[in-house]
Image (cartoon, coloured by chain):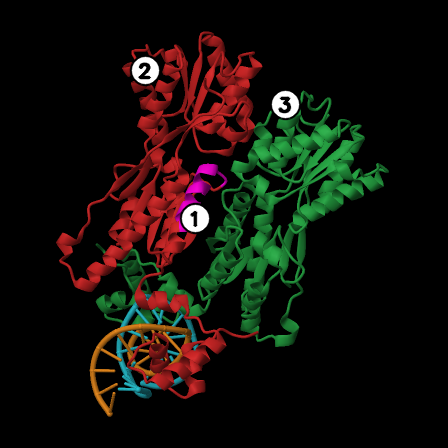
Chain colours: A red, B green, C orange, D cyan
Amino acid sequence: MKKKVTLKQIARELDVSVSTVSRALADSKEIGENTRRRIQAFAKFLNYKPNNIALSLKNKKTKTIGVLIPEIVHHFFSTVIRGIEIVANERGYNVIVGLSNESFSKEVLNMEMLANGSIDGFVLSISKETLLKQDYHHFNETISQGIPIVMFDRVVNEVECDKVIVDDFKGSVKAVKKLVANGCKHIGLITTMDYVSVGRLRTQGYLRALEESQVYAEPDLILKLDDMVSLEENLDILENEIEQLFKKNPKIDGVFAVNELYAVTAMKVAKKLGLAIPDDLQVIGFTDGVLSKHASPSLTIVSQHGQKIGEKAADLLIDRLEMEDEDNDTNVNENTREQAFETYVIETEIIERESTK
Amino acid sequence: MKKKVTLKQIARELDVSVSTVSRALADSKEIGENTRRRIQAFAKFLNYKPNNIALSLKNKKTKTIGVLIPEIVHHFFSTVIRGIEIVANERGYNVIVGLSNESFSKEVLNMEMLANGSIDGFVLSISKETLLKQDYHHFNETISQGIPIVMFDRVVNEVECDKVIVDDFKGSVKAVKKLVANGCKHIGLITTMDYVSVGRLRTQGYLRALEESQVYAEPDLILKLDDMVSLEENLDILENEIEQLFKKNPKIDGVFAVNELYAVTAMKVAKKLGLAIPDDLQVIGFTDGVLSKHASPSLTIVSQHGQKIGEKAADLLIDRLEMEDEDNDTNVNENTREQAFETYVIETEIIERESTK
DNA sequence: TTGTATGCGTTATCAA
DNA sequence: TTGATAACGCATACAA
């Protein structure tokens, strides 16, 4: 087993000092042409690579960003990670992933664990339990320790940091208006409880679109579902709820669903009830997932561009990290140094498939 | 901005030495009752947490495992990561994720990057390009540097390390025998090119099942697809290929597909051609994904239990890492110390849904 | 019971 | 042009 080679070993074998080796490898021209080349050649021969951990300790930066998400087996989140990874890699950073599993305590634990030197900054999306408790102290503490955070998708006003969101409101308005334009008169909404911000915003978009289209918003057409129904074992409950919605509202001719599962399930139930899609019922879902592409009929969606979200979030974080570096270099005044926080909105886009006319 | 507190600061403020603080916080009973409590109280008050990087440098271990996968926007791989994460977290490890994007050079780069001190060991699945080139030097170099690797799913004999695989062969045999038992006489196979080991093994399983069932294996019933067809923009090519398969073999009454996309697409094409599922055609796919649950009819599958794979892989890796520790402690003889490498097989399971009788 | 010195691998400062 | 030394934050062998 060849142990990892260090500067010290190279120095010993070449009978020079460690600092000489260090400088030679950094191509410092303080070092004589010959020694420099001799050292570089030998280092290359031994396949020397500097130890990241030692560098991190010395530089007080890890070149690693921590990503904290509620769930990884989820098309949207994995797409975001992919975006983060791409940008991080390009810019010389690694990505360390933590899962909160929608739990407040796991989120806190994970943050604390990573905040102790393992990462330079976070990109995260808040867990549902945290949103429900409205306890954001861990975020603010992390920030006040000098570790920047970029939040995406599930964000919150109580924390001051950069944010990347999709245009939930406008996207929903667009979707619902499209249904109206396509001739729908009685448009149902299948959404989540309000504490999930994206659910709330998408609901508001639905209402606004109806208002602006001067279509009366029938309260009966709104189905607010508890999160439980998304669990696989509760699929029949979900189907049942949606079936009730359809049966109570026989005139329903359009559905806007705030996520993929709701949308696809709605299509399934509709077909079971003998409704033809898109002739009797048109459906649009807010999602980016795989189900919509392969459903039959394939689902028209409001695409949230997860990868772009990830890319933008990573860029914002790294920009801030590297800005701090410059500040330290140039000794900028503490007070003028704060850069305003940005909330970046990723535009949604309607991708038309077969579930609309 | 409260800077992170270090032992040194605590020592200074309490007018003791750094080592005293270090020992007091480690609850060493060399330290007097009073000082110990005083230091612990103060540290708690300042919310002291040891710096991971410094610990890593000192202990020469990072408590971090590197996960290298070809693709993250993929149900199987994200499920595996979830399994790894759960076990890693339980056992006090972090997870750092690298994506090869099926590219050889990205795989090599990522490994080198992480191997320079950032991680204690790898859990990985080989990229397609690497499999095609059959160049495994980076794995063997990493191992010979003393960094253990656990491979999962896409593994290779040329590298000696722990492995976790699903029982591709047996699972396929089971699936095809089920089709035979259900009365299928002409069973098609939709598979990948042979260089992807799982595709090859599943193909072998198909052939074996037919042989053992004394059903003649008709070469025309086997459709080997290039990987390109899995790309979204090539969906129509995929459909077309499958349609040809069906048209050339009108007697086909069963299909075994080695992945979810092939299976779901086969059902779609079959329905288009007017075949009733499962009455005219029964379909089984090798997968764990979401499409199969929500397809209509829902797809009967051979489940590969991604999460279990991840859990087992992480356990194997951490076991080996911690075994090395013990060896170092007890100064075991270098030669006796090697522990045999294990190849752990995760049993597959058929989950019956609506696409079979 | 506590403190001093050393080292993990690196770079930067200061001397020579 | 090169080398010795200190420092990053921590743990520990050795002194006191």
Residue B21 vs residue B53, the one in the foreground: B53
Q: Secondary structure at mark 3?
A: helix
Callout 2: SS: helix
Give the labeled residue for mark 2.
A210
How many neighbours does mark 2 have within 10 angstroms: few (below 14), some (14-19), or many (20 or more)? many
Q: Assess whether mark 2 and mark 1 are in contact (beta carbons under 8 angstroms).
A: no
- In three-dimensional space, the C-alpha distance between marks 1 and 2, rounded to whole angstroms, equals 40 Å
**Distance (Cα) linking label 3 and label 1:** 43 Å
Q: Residue at x 35, y 77 (%)?
A: A22
Residue tagged by mark 3? B272
Q: Chain of mark 2?
A: A
Q: Amino acid at mark 1?
A: Gly
Residue at which label 1 appears: A98
From the image, which quarter does the N terminus of chain B lie in?
bottom left
Q: Secondary structure at mark 1?
A: strand
Quadrant of residue A311 within the rendered picture = top left
Return the chain for callout 1. Answer: A
Mark with earlier residue (1, 2): 1
Identify residue type, mark 3. Answer: Lys
Crowding around mark 1 (Cα neighbors within 10 Å: few <14, some 14 to 19, many 20+) is many
Q: Main secondary structure of the magenta part?
A: helix
Residue B169 lies within the magenta run: no
Q: Which label number is shown at residue A329?
A: none
On the question of residue A326 being in view, the answer is yes
Q: Amino acid at mark 2?
A: Leu
Q: Residue at x 29, y 41 (%)?
A: A163
Query: Residue A125 in the image: x percent, y percent?
Result: 37, 41
Circle 3 or circle 1, nearest the eye: 3
